[in-house]
Image: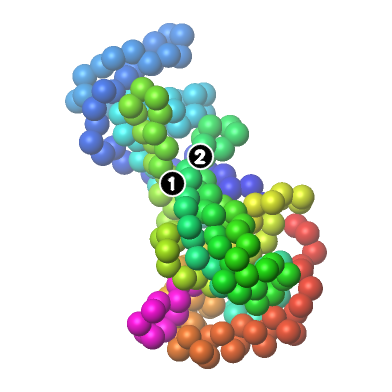
Amino acid sequence: MKIKTLLSSLTVVALGVCGSGALTRHGHAGPVSSQAQVDDATLKRVIREQGLQGAARLKGHYVGVATAPCWPSYTLETITRDSALVLVGTPLTNLCELDSEGDGITTDYQVSVNEAIKGNLAPGSVITVSVPGGRVEFPDGTSAELRVQDFKKMENGKTYVLFLRNRQPGSEKFITTGAAQGLFEVPNDESGVKPHGSAINTVCKENQDKPVANFFREVREFAKKWPDPPPCC
């Protein structure tokens, strides 16, 4: 599934405007006052024509708010069934980058595998998990950021249960099944698992603060029931 910014649902926020630019007739950025106001229609047009780097030239620091990719609402059993991998892992590093069309941003995490509950990954192996959103800086000192609604991202060094699918057929990168539904933090203080998705989704609502041992037991039972990866796409 391609992680994509939907321009039609984009909400634009300007923060800390400095070193701004304005479009010339040739579509390049020229200097304007840092107090310049740019309407949403202009920003959408610039993103469509020049990508997020063009919006950054206009705003200095551009921030967009987008919706996550659309998925069904899962239960713990169905999200396990529909995942190619279910693992306990720890993010080590992360890197944000523009997508190939320049109008979306993804954050790629290098995740160390502690345990593969579903799938054949060995403990200690490292995989790439891509999530939507992030912040990139450009050589001219401007930056662009995309924040995804209802998608709390991971923090390096913490422990998570991840429900994953291949990003694309044949890709070595993975995405979380069900967007933020497929991501649960496992705290060290025994306070229970912390879903990263919205409580509007069943799997998040039903497992909020569930004791860690109970959560792991249920996931392992479902992984035994559904050991095979789902059909691609």
Q: Which mark is residue 97?
A: 2
Q: Which mark is residue 15?
A: none
Residue 152 placement: quadrant: bottom left
The quadrant of the picture occupied by the C terminus is bottom right
Contact between marks 2 and 1 (CB within 8 A): the answer is yes
* Residue at x 72% of width, y 71% of height: 119
Q: Residue furthest top?
A: 25
Residue 4 located left or right of residue 52: right
- Between 13 and 128, the one lying in front of the other is 128
Residue 35 located left or right of residue 90: left
Determine whether 231 is above or below 192 in the image.
above
Residue 86 visible in the shown view: no
Q: Is residue 117 inside the magenta stretch? A: no
Span shown in magenta: 181-193
Amino acid type at mark 2: Glu
Residue 169 visible in the shown view: yes
* Residue at x 40% of width, y 28% of height: 138
Amino acid type at mark 1: Gly
Determine whether 134 is above or below 22 in the image.
below
**Circle 1 residue:** 134
- Between 225 and 115, the one lying in front of the other is 115
* Residue at x 45% of width, y 80% of height: 193
User: Tag 1 or tag 2, which sits nearer the N-term?
Assistant: 2
